[in-house]
Image: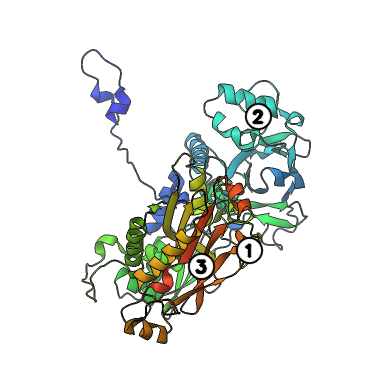
Amino acid sequence: MVRKEVGGASMKGSPNLDATSDDVIYKIDIPANRYDMLCLEGIARALNVFRGKVKAPRYTLAGSNPSANASFTPLRLTVKPETALVRPFVVAAVLRGIRFDAARYNSFIELQDKLHQNLCRHRTLVAIGTHDLGKVKGPFTYEALPPEDIRFVPLKQEREFNARELLEHYAANDLKLRKYVPIIQSSLVYPVILDSERTVLSLPPVINGSKSAISMETRDVFIECTATDLTKAKVVLNTMCAMYSEYCEVPFEIEPVEVVDASGVSEMYPDVSPKHFEVDMGYVNTCIGLEIEASLAATLLKKMQLEAVADGNTLRVDAPITRSDVLHACDVMEDVAIAYGYDNLTIQPPKLATTGKEQPLSQLCELLRIDCATSGFTEVLTWALCSRKENFTDLRVEDPGTGATDGAVSIGNPATAEFEVCRTSLLPSILKTVAANKSAPLPVKLFEVSDVLLLDDASDVGARNERRLIAINCDKSSGFEVVHGLLNRIMQVVGVPHETLSEDTPKNRDLIAQGVSYSWKADDNPTYFQGRHASVYAMGKRIGGFGVVHPDVLNNFGVDFPVAALEITIEPFVFDQNNRPLMTHSAPMI
């Protein structure tokens, strides 16, 4: 504090320390998921509730009681279909009768900046616009127009620009705003929010119009959040409203706005209803190592701004709009532990004595890596994500589309077109590696032991990992016999005989009698050359295949020479000396 007040400039003699402030400045680290504590209002409220000085506020919507507000008509914000081309979602709310002073106004602006840098991902996901409702006139529209058709005077400017000129001006002259220009600059249309008189309120996610600018004299604030992610837009709107609605004429009352989407469906925002959870106290006590009653846990949760009621051995919890981080029973358990005090938790020895060791699946992988390397193959490690085109079309496999049971796990809002889905095969990644190393001398022999991700309705998350091995041989001739020989060697290493009993020993005869064997059968696969592919079977199930990759597939990936590939799952071979399945990713193989 002293250093800040006296400054870093050189001074004659000693600085006058008597003129400095006695105020103590605290630096507080806020968890990344506690968006409600990014402003002073949120921190103060959380501390006061935790210390029992005030109760957690209850947020209400203006007009929610029809008998008392028969004449209430919400503002309307209509979304035009063209916005789907650039920034499809918008939510909004109004804070009526708000009273700003210098500290409150600065906090209001700073919270927007912090949310933009944090949850909004530098405005790429959400952009917040705040406007003086007394200077504009509803109803409002959210449109997407050609940049030349958008003309307005932006904040901190004195002349009118069209949208294209404005973005070029910011890119060349404004260090703060230039980083937001690329978000929409390449779009054919730009998003814009207009009032009933076609006054531009904002050009999201870059700048607001000067006419609707807020000030300390503003009494009614119109908040709009445009977004590419509707869920995050709702969280941002809720956070802004919850933090500053306490300064409204009716504290903690928010006026909703009716948003009519492009299909004509109407919805009121914000939604201030709490999220409901039912949590078993046995789970809570097991996780934090205590034996506390549900009633005590409910009291502790109230200190964390969660409304909780004990019902026998069950906690019924309501999470307010400020606690968007509470998503699961584990979050409730964590809040119980925080309120109880981490320092008050007793250290207990574990009830079971265990010895850590490598997972059986990992042991098998290391064994196979060593053997593939000694067979002349070089190991690679590639990305687990790829484009939808690479995963399906380039392999000559029909794309079943998003949500299909035989499709791929899709990434929401992918940062790049190269990372759209989780791979369902190791082949695209290893072919890209070959294409990127065309200068390498032939033959190119590569292998990888890694996971693919497959949709699975039986899994609690809807998908499961599967550990696979892939090996390819790229040469002037396909080298089909090279990968075929590697398959036989792998089976020899894992101790699984061929069903024809090519090595007639008593042990192999016993294994085959128990159903432990492998075989291959010629078949056709669109990814491979017709008549040059075989499926591999082990323990009665198909585990993969090998063959000569189709020329069209090689052309799609930019590979100039023939390639033979072997790809199998190795999880069926994770068993003990008595052929009993051991643990793989989450459960023993059956």
Q: The N terminus is located in which quarter? A: top left
Side (left or right) of 43 relative to 342: right
Mark in front: 1 vs 2: 1
Q: The residue under label 1 is which amino acid type?
A: Gly
Q: Amino acid at mark 3?
A: Gly
| Residue 518 placement (x, y as % from top left) | 45, 75
Q: Which mark is residue 210?
A: 2
User: Residue 364: percent from the left, percent from the top?
Assistant: 34, 67
Tell me, yes or no, whether the two marked residues, 1 and 3, touch with CB atoms within 8 Å: no
Q: Is any atom of residue 295 visible in this view?
A: no
Foreground residue, 52 or 372? 372
| Colour setup of the view | rainbow
For the point 77% across and 35% down, the residue is 198
Residue 403's tag is: 1
The image shows residue 434 at horizontal and vertical percentages of 49, 47
Tell me the distance, in whole angstroms, between the alpha carbons under discs 3 and 2.
63 Å
- Say whether marks 3 and 2 touch (CB < 8 Å): no
What residue occupies the far top of the structure in this picture? 12
Q: Judging from the image, what secondary structure is the residue with disc 1 in?
A: loop
Mark 2, Cα crowd under 10 Å, few <14 / some 14-19 / many 20+, is some
Question: Of residues 152 and 576, which is closer to you in this image?
Answer: 576
